[in-house]
Image (cartoon, grey):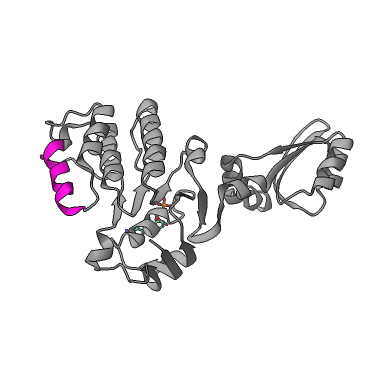
Amino acid sequence: MNVKVENLGLHYGRDEALKNITFELTEKKIYGLLGRNGAGKTSFLSILASFREATSGSITMDGEVPFENANIMQQVLFLYNKDYKDESDNVKSLLEDVQRYRPNFDIDYAEHLIKRFKLDKKKPLKKFSKGMQSAFNVAVGLATRAEITIFDEVYLGMDAPSRDIFYKELLQDQADHPRVFILSTHLVSEMDYLFDEVILLHKGEILLHEDVDSFTTKGAKVTGSKDLVDEFVGSKKQLNTEQLGDTKAIFIYGEFSQEERKAASHAGLEISNLSLQDLFIHLTGEEEEYETK
Ligand SMILES: Nc1ncnc2c1ncn2[C@@H]1O[C@H](COP(=O)(O)OP(=O)(O)OP(=O)(O)O)[C@@H](O)[C@H]1O
């Protein structure tokens, strides 16, 4: 399903939470949505899922407006950190409900996931721990096989082994039944290998939307003697610097040619790649603002 978002904006009263959001998702891929606290991720995802209407701009899915459009919305699933404290139904009956409304729901796969997460099918959801409720959300999210599956920090409370099951199942099920996944997360270094593309939201705007591999090859850390590092880096965009004695490291956002890499090596400089987490921290960091205060 093709998703097109144009000039989308959202106001909460007089506060502008989202502005000029424009992008297109054309392929069945896993998209990572990153952004600092308050960047606008949940606001944006809830508009995408038609839980909320935008103040301006448009969204279309396969050319149709999704808001209050039952055909389209049946193919979009939004799972978030929901409060199940009043949910007296047990897992079994909740899965049967989902099966009734979602055409691609695979009950056998849901049961496989429920077993892997060691959830008691007969227990009311409100009696599960936070992490177990999140694991239930993950099971529903994967087994529904919606064309667009949105997970908004869905892992909250899940322990490391459960998150590992989630990631493995996600990759396997995406290989078997490709669709669009949009995952918002703060666990950047833990989840970066899952993403095909990354969308970075910053202060309500899209800072970048790129293929993860090409994005991470743009980040580099140049380390060596201070003067040589400064000269080599020249006018490239600097994200951060670290210095210990005469040794300096500069974090760069930009590409180096083969010749530049050779020259660096001749000069005894080391160029290493930055992780998605490094790039995220330094592209959205506030160091410069602090320095000028
Ligand atoms: N219901 C609301 N009413 C008023 N302002 C809101 C509401 N929901 C969110 N906001 C504001 O909109 C901005 C974006 O919030 P949002 O929850 O979308 O960010 P987020 O990126 O999901 O943050 P986090 O990573 O902390 O979950 C914030 O400034 C927030 O205070």
Would you say 72 lies left or right of 263 here? left
In the rendered image, residue 90 lying in the magenta stretch gets the answer: yes
The percent coordinates of residue 287 (x first, y second) are 63, 47
Residue 232 in view: yes
Would you say 285 lies left or right of 80 here? right
Closer to the camera in the image, 245 or 99: 99
| Residue at image coords 38%, 69% | 59
Q: How many labels does the image show?
A: 0
Outermost residue, front direction?
A: 176
Q: Is the magenta stretch mostly helix, strand or loop?
A: helix
| Residue at image coords 81%, 42% | 261
Image vertical order of residue 39 relative to residue 93, above or below: below
Would you say 238 lies left or right of 84 here? right
The percent coordinates of residue 253 (x first, y second) are 69, 50
- Please give the range of residues in magenta: 88-102
Q: Quadrant of the N terminus?
A: bottom left
Residue 188 in view: no
The percent coordinates of residue 138 (x first, y second) are 30, 40
Figure quadrant, ligand 1: bottom left
The percent coordinates of residue 49 (x first, y second) are 32, 59
In the rendered image, residue 1 lying in the magenta stretch gets the answer: no
